[in-house]
Amino acid sequence: MKALMLALLASTALVAPAQATETPADTEATGNDFGVLVMAHGGKPDWEREVAAALAPLEAEQPFEIAWGMADAASLQAAVDKLEARGVDRIGVVRLFVSGESWYDRTRQILGLEPGAPAPPAPDPHAGHHGHGGGNGSHGGHSMEFWQLDADASFAISKDGLMDAPEMGQVLATRAEALATDPASESVLILAHGPADDDEDARWKAQLDERADLVRALGFRHVQVETLREDWPEKRKEAEARVRAYVEAAARDGGRAIVIPFRVQGFGPYEKVLAGLDYVSDGRGLVPHPAVAEWVRREAAALRAELAE
């Protein structure tokens, strides 16, 4: 754990020179600088408020915007417009998703980093700076428009997701330690959304299992990683059975289950899934925790270096 904290400090140091030598005013004056665009799934107002609060420290360090939704061209365009209006011409896109595979190719196409996205729709004079409209589906209350951005900036995009981030192991350990009363008799379930594809799901579990190592180091009786396969009914049915069986077994012989969601924010559908079972959880996802902003900061520093090459 000491090594991990040293690594977090080192990651913060990567961006310290930029903080010391540049300000938003400098950016606007030169018209030649770097900004950060974070893509976040978004959801209900409390979801977005909590994520925005977790990332707020980054706003003072360099030009910064959040694009809500899942690779939605309209949301991305609006965020890019704001950054370009501040003189930014190099943008690091950090995807605040659990899996680095989520919408990666689609996002590259929208950013123009690879072919595949159509031209923007005709401008709508009633819809903002670029005014692009036209529907392309929606998900969870957010549009999912798909077209190539109208932008002059150059882009670099992060490849990893939160489950690839060593920092998230510290988040899990913090959650587990706060909930524990007698680790030797307690079992910890780390529960994530999960994808449809079985091979991808196996990759999720392998990465999450690595993140769970700091929880195991706290001396719990057992630590298990599961994915619920939430959006695929047949696979979800099997996953729910495994999850409930694990929590039931953990409560036997004087034991107790601690459930930690590996989600960006909140407890998702897990309260309903676990209804009637004996377990403890604070319902918190990865935010609020300063390690989330630290990871975004580290990813942004790597993208800044990439765009400087």
Image (spheres, grey):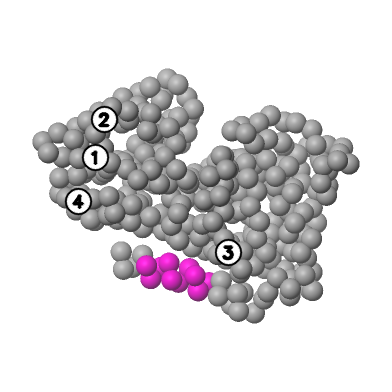
- Percent x, y of residue 196: 48, 29
* Labels 3 and 1: the sequence-earlier one: 3
Question: Is the C-beta separation of discs 3 and 2 under 8 Å?
Answer: no
The correct choice, above or below, for 278 with respect to 173 in the image is above
Callout count? 4
Q: In which quarter of the image is the N terminus?
A: bottom left
Q: Residue 58 carries which label?
A: 3
Which residue occupies 76% across, 43% down?
148
Which residue occupies 65% across, 60% down?
64
Frontmost of labels 1 and 2 is 2
The correct choice, above or below, for 60 with respect to 105 in the image is below
According to the picture, the residue beneath numbered tag 1 turns out to be 257
Q: Residue 181 carries which label?
A: 4
Which residue occupies 45% across, 54% down?
288
* Labels 1 and 2: the sequence-earlier one: 1
Task: Give the alpha-carbon distance from disc 4 to disc 3, as whole Å.
Answer: 35 Å
- Tell me the crowding category of disc 1: few under 14, some 14 to 19, or many 20 or more residues within 10 angstroms, Cα based: many
According to the picture, the residue beneath numbered tag 2 turns out to be 277
Question: Is the C-beta separation of discs 1 and 2 under 8 Å?
Answer: yes
